[in-house]
Amino acid sequence: MNQGQPDLNYELYKLKQSFNRNKKAFVPLIVALLLAVGFFTSYYTVEPDEEAVVIRLGRYLDTTQPGLHFKIPFGVDRVIKVKTKIVHQEEFGFRTQSLDTRRTTYSSRNLDEESLMLTGDLNVAEVQWVVQYQISDPFKFLFKTSEPVRNIRDVSESIMRRVVGDIMVTEVLTTGRVGIAGDAKQLMQEVLDKYDMGVLIRSIKLQDVNPPKKVQASFNDVNAAKQEQEKMINQAEQAYNKVIPEARGKAKKLVSEAQGYAQAVVNRAEGDADRFSEIYREYIKAPAITKKRLYLETMEELFSKLEDVVIIDSKVKGLLPVFGKGITNEK
C-alpha cells in the first residue's frame, strides 16, 4: 500500500460500521422520502386541450378527460398526455421558418423529393401543400401504429401523387387546385380509417403549385397567352349578350306589329263582309228601295267631302246666266 493514499477497503468498512450504528435514524428518512414520492406521483392534471391515456403495468387502462385525476404511484400507472383539441399541421414541399405578426417566411430548399410530381400527361409539377388534422382517439393514435406522424406524412404524400397523376398539368397549375385538395382529403381519410389510426383530417390546402423552375418562363408565356385568349372570349361574349337581346327585342316588336296589322285587316274584312251580308239581305227583300238608299248614302258621303257644289240642269245652254254675277249688257 502506497504511503499517503487511503485504503479503499478500510474506508468502505468504516462507512458500513457508521451506517449500522445509525440505520435506525435513516429508516424514518427513507419512509418520508417514499411517502413524498408516492404523494407527488399519485395524481396528474389534464389540460383543457388534452386527453390522457393511462397505462397500468404495460396494459391500456383508460382515457381520461381534462381535470385532476389520481393514479397508482411508483410507476405502476403511466400517463401519456395527447393534444386532442388543437389542429396539428404537416407541411410538404416547404417548411415554415419563422412566424410573426408582420411576416411569415418559408423555405423549399432541398425538398424537391416531396414537391415534384408526375401529372397525367407525363409532365412535372411542383406541388406544396399543408395537411391539418386532429387526433380523435388518443389510444389508437399512440398504439395502433408505430410513428403515427411519419405514417400520416407517408399517406399524404402517396395520396397527393396519386391524385395529381390522374389529371393534366394545365389543370394542376390553374383551375384544378380545389378539386385536388378535396379528392386528396377524402382519399387520405379513407386510408387512415382503414388503418384505424384515430386521426381526423380537417383540411388539405395547396400552398403553391408551379411548374419546375427550369421551365417556369415558358409556362408563364403560355399562361399569359391563355389569359389573353380568355379575355377576348369574354369580350366577344359580352358583345354577343348585348347585341342578341337587342336584336331579339326588335324582332319581337316587328312580329307584334305585323300580328296587330294582320288582325286589324282581318277584323276590317270581317266587318265589311258582315255589312255586305246585311245589305244583301235587305236587297233581297226590297231591291229598288235598297238600291236607292245605297245611291243616296254614297252621294251624301261624296258631297260631304266637297267644299263648293254646283248643280246644272242639262237644258241650260251656258253657265253665266246661272250665276248672275258680274254680267253687264253692252249696246
Image (cartoon, rainbow, N blue to C red):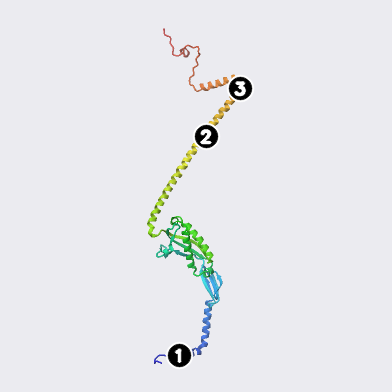
Considering depth in this image, is 40 or 124 the residue closer to the camera? 124
Q: Residue at x 48, y 57 (%)?
A: 179
Q: Residue at x 41, y 50 (%)?
A: 229
Where does the image place residue 177, in percent across and percent down from the top left? Answer: 46, 57
Q: Quadrant of the C terminus?
A: top left
Considering depth in this image, is 49 or 234 the residue closer to the camera? 234
| Residue type marked 1 | Asn
Q: In front of the other: label 3 or label 2?
A: 3
Disc 2 crowd rating (10 Å Cα; few below 14, some 14-19, many 20+) is: few
Q: SS class of the residue under badge 2?
A: helix
Cα distance in 3D space between marks 3 and 2: 36 Å
Q: Is residue 21 above or below residue 215?
A: below
Disc 1 crowd rating (10 Å Cα; few below 14, some 14-19, many 20+) is: few
| Residue type marked 3 | Ile
Where does the image place residue 66, in percent across and percent down from the top left? Answer: 54, 69
| Residue type marked 2 | Gly
Q: Which mark is residue 108?
A: none
Question: Residue most toward the front?
Answer: 122
Cα distance in 3D space between marks 1 and 2: 133 Å
Q: Is residue 95 above or below residue 251?
A: below
In this image, 147 relative to 284: left or right?
A: left
In the picture, residue 273 is in which quadrant? Answer: top right
Q: SS class of the residue under badge 3?
A: helix
Q: Badge 2 is on which residue?
A: 260
Q: Which mark is residue 9?
A: 1
Cα distance in 3D space between marks 1 and 3: 165 Å
In this image, 102 relative to 263: left or right?
A: left
